[in-house]
Structure formats: C-alpha cells, structure tokens
Image (spheres, helix red, strand yellow):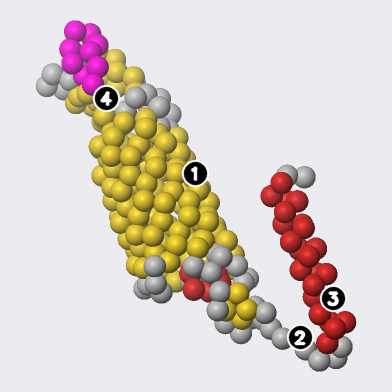
Amino acid sequence: MSRVSFALALVASVAAASTAGAADLYGSNAAPAASYGGYQQDGGAGGPAQQWTGAYAGGQIGYGWGKDGMHGAQGGIFGGVQTAVGANMVVGGEAELNINGQSLHSVAGGQLLKRSSDWNGAIRARAGVAFDRVMPYGSVGVVFVDDTAKGFGATASTTKVGYMFGAGVEGKVNDKISLRGELNYVGVGNTTQNVGGVAVRSNASAAVLRTGAAYKF
C-alpha cells in the first residue's frame, strides 16, 4: 500500500470512528454539523469544494527547460470549468494556448541553424482537493507543440502531438480571483526536418515551471 493510500485509509477510519462516537454521545439526537472553512459538512452548503465550482479564465507565464537544450520563457491564456465531487474533491477540464520563446542555435552542415518551439497548446483534465481557499491539484492531457528549424533562407516546421502532466497549487485571493503555481512536463517525439539540404533533428519536450492568475465567472 502506498503512503497516499495508507493516509486516505487512516483518515477514513478516523472519520468513521468519530461518526460512531458522535452517534453514541448524542443518542437519538442528531450531532451538530461540522463546519470546515465556513462551509457545512452536512451537505447544506456543499463543503469547501463548492467555492471552486464554475467556469474560469486567466493568464500565465513561465519558463521551459527543453530536453534538447531549447530553453526559454513562455506565456499565454487558459480557461476551463470545474465542479465539486463531494465535500472536498474538485474535477474539471482546461484548455490553454501559449506563445513560446524556447530556442537553440547550433551549426550543422556548414550553416547556422535555429531550432525553436514558437507556440504550444493543451487540453487537459484537472483534479484537486480543496482545503478551504487552497487547492493542490494534478493534471494530465494532450499537448500540441510547434517544432521549427531555420537555416539560411530555409525553414521547416511541424506540429507535434504529445502528452502533458503535472501538479500545482492554487489559492483564492477572494471569491473571484485565484493565483496558481505549477510544474508540468511536456512530452513529444523526435523530429527530423530538411532545412536547406541539412537533416536537422530536434525534440521539443520540456519541463515547464509557471505561475498564473484566474478569474472565476
């Protein structure tokens, strides 16, 4: 059993024991509803996860460290929708589009070459655990990445399809605005392109650290 599974089982056991103890203590009278983060846990207000439910949009900025040495800043926009599952779980979907500044210069075949990834986008699923106004989360999805190579008077470009996964933490500033920080990995396959008669191999995979802000509608 993993540590996470053990922890969840322990929490469930404690919760069950607490409920049984409360029932014995109050007899036929209902125990008072427990509150967490200002939300009733008896379903009256939906629990802490309820405040994260709805559509949102925002902007983000970060830096990518490429597998092939293509490093650089990137930034863009994102939007999504999420809903509460029980008192604390939050699940949803998100889409994003970024301008990418990752690039690498090299010399091959007697000419100067520039390999770059000028943009990327993704569609991913998110799942988090709401602790009142703070929510750690994980995500996984499909990513679309530009992979471009340029030489003297020649350019070759392709769009790669791959995977993206990561984790982050989001916190609410108020009921409408939240801030987030996350680390993601973008994985795509190798690309070999002909640039002015030179075979150029590249890989636009990268680890991306970024921060962002969102507005909840």
Where does label 2 land, which residue? 31
Tag nearer the camera, 4 or 3: 3
Label 4 – label 3 distance at C-alpha:
63 Å
209 vs 16, left or right, is left
| Quadrant housing the N terminus | top right
Q: Which circle's residue, 2 or 1, is located before the other in the chain?
A: 2
Q: Which circle's residue, 2 or 3, is located before the other in the chain?
A: 3
Where does label 4 land, which residue? 104
The residue segment tinted magenta is 104-113
| Quadrant housing the C terminus | bottom left
Is residue 195 something one can see in this rendering?
A: no
Q: Badge 3, how many Cα within 10 Å: few under 14, some, many 20+?
A: few
93 vs 33, left or right, is left
Tag nearer the camera, 2 or 4: 2
The amino acid marked with disc number 4 is Leu
The amino acid marked with disc number 3 is Ala
Q: Which mark is residue 165?
A: 1
Q: Is residue 117 magenta?
A: no
What residue sits 35% from the left and 55% below the top? Answer: 212
Q: Seen from this angle, which residue lies furthest top?
A: 110
Where does label 3 land, which residue? 20
Q: Which circle's residue, 3 or 1, is located before the other in the chain?
A: 3
Q: Which circle's residue, 4 or 1, is located before the other in the chain?
A: 4
Label 2 – label 4 distance at C-alpha:
64 Å
What residue sits 37% from the left and 24% below the top? Answer: 68
Label 4 – label 1 distance at C-alpha:
24 Å
The amino acid marked with disc number 2 is Ala
